[in-house]
Amino acid sequence: MRSRPVALVTGVGRRAGIGAAIAARLVADGWTVACSYWGAYDDRMPWGADETRPGAGSFEVEANLEDPAAPRVLFSSVVTQLGDVQALVLAHCESVDSGFLDTSLDSFDRHFAVNTRASWLLMREFATRYRGAHGAGRIVALTSDHVAGNVPYGASKGALDRLVIAAARELGPLGITANSVNPGPTDTGWLDDSLRAALVDRTPLGRLGTPADCANLVSFLCGPDGGWLTGRVLTSDGGLS
């Protein structure tokens, strides 16, 4: 009997979040899924933390990705518990609104530590440990093109896109693909009624994205049919952009 491949999905902190939808979809696709989360982030955000964990994966690890040692510790925990990782999905983020003139140094550094540095370290850890079949390795990172009014978030995600493109080029010989997915505005509980209505009105398909929309694309990229697509920043936003 063939064993289920292992995927690590970061940022699975809330049941309404994209990370939880991705984890659940990969489980349905036949993956064994490890999830990481950081409860302190949700606690300080307006939506707050869920009373109970999403339970979307087979193994859950709390990891503060602002700590540069966390990616190595996280991978060691997952590999010890489940075995070698075949797919890495980066769904974690630091996202606190601030503009060009009012962003603090601490906030700027935290965004880049979590969204950019941790993602690089996780991808590097994945690549150095990868033992799967050539062409079966997968990296998928969630990104965003929003930057005005959310400067440290958008800037750190832009840097992440460049890292993913570099990974596609440099890790391709190891048999690993790397892509970014920009899901556009996704209704996970952070939108107020006026912003939700404005975004729906601007979207040609007449609705906002759902976590399942992003999970469907990530499912394709992680599966065998996504093996010839690499080095791309894919926008999946109902035509909003």
Image (cartoon, rainbow, N blue to C red):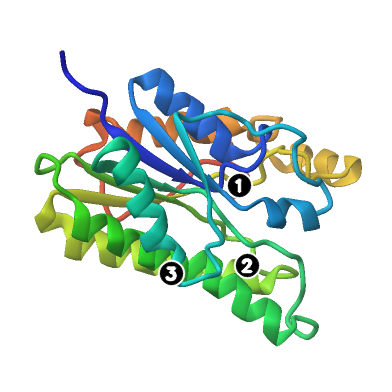
Task: Label 1, secondary structure: give it.
Answer: loop
Residue 233 vertical position relative to residue 217 in the rendered view, above or below: below
Q: Which mark's residue is nearer the viewer, 3 or 1?
A: 3
Q: CA distance from mark 2 to mark 1?
A: 14 Å
Image position of 185 (left or right of 101): left
Residue 106 vertical position relative to residue 154 in the rendered view, above or below: below
Q: CA distance from mark 3 to mark 1?
A: 31 Å
| Residue that carries the numbered disc 2 in the rendered image | 153
Identify the disc placed on residue 89.
none
The amino acid marked with disc number 3 is Ala
Image position of 189 (left or right of 235): right
Q: Quadrant of the N terminus?
A: top left
Image position of 159 (left or right of 151): left
**Location of residue 198 by image quarter:** top right
Most distant residue in the top direction: 1
Q: Circle 1: is it few (<14), some (14-19), or many (20+) Cα within 10 Å?
A: many
Residue 144 rendering spot, x and y as whole percentages: 56, 57
The amino acid marked with disc number 2 is Tyr
**14 vs 108, nearest the viewer:** 14
Q: Residue at x 63, y 43 (%)?
A: 13
